[in-house]
Image (spheres, helix red, strand yellow):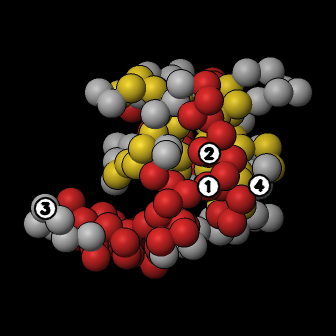
Amino acid sequence: MDENPNPSEAPFADAATLAELARLSAAAQAAAPGDTAPWAALWAATLALPRWIFIARGDEQHPSPFMAVMDEGPMLMAFTTPERAREGGLSLGLPEGELGRLLAVPGGAAVDWVASFAQHGVVGIAFDHPTLGYFSPLANLPRIRDWL
């Protein structure tokens, strides 16, 4: 996990990837009940991201990812880019001064790290709120990864 990622040093989703995620998210949201193919494509693209970005909370020695209470319960808020993390944090009521510290988790390690927060009562993860806003229960993430 990298704290305070520098966009010039860490790979983040590029414009083409962001556009593809938006297209896949729209297709998944519009899918008929029981149609898992669009959701599989969206999560495959999400799992392939080079880094998952989180707004860091807590002290410098033990930062934790920002969580928001949504209708489903406490959810980790993940983002594809530092810019989307800033937009999401502001939309969820965080002051500008609390948005500078970020955590960047390599995509390959993100699922297990995120899933570990279930033991603390976190029920899910949402991506790019409010831009895309798709989510999954934490318990489903390892299953999704293994299924794909």
Q: Residues within 10 Å of mark 1 (few under 14, many from 20)?
A: many
Specify the farthest residue to the left.
32
In the image, which disc is placed on residue 111?
A: 1
Query: Which residue carries the number 4 mark?
Result: 6
Figure quadrant of residue 21? bottom left
Question: How far apart, in angstroms, are the residues tagged by discs 4 and 2?
Answer: 22 Å
Alpha carbon separation for disc pair 1 and 3: 25 Å
Cα gap from disc 3 to disc 2, whole angstroms: 27 Å
Q: Amino acid at mark 2?
A: Val
Camera-nearest residue between 7 and 34? 34
Mark 1 or mark 4: whose residue is earlier in sequence: 4
As measured in the structure, the alpha-carbon distance from the residue carrying label 2 to the one carrying label 1 is: 5 Å
As drawn, 43 above or below 112: below
Q: Looking at the picture, how far across and down is residue 111, in whole percent?
A: 61, 55
Check contact, mark 4 vs mark 2: CB within 8 A: no
Element under disc 3: loop
Q: Secondary structure at mark 1?
A: helix
Regarding mark 2 in the picture, which secondary structure is present there? helix
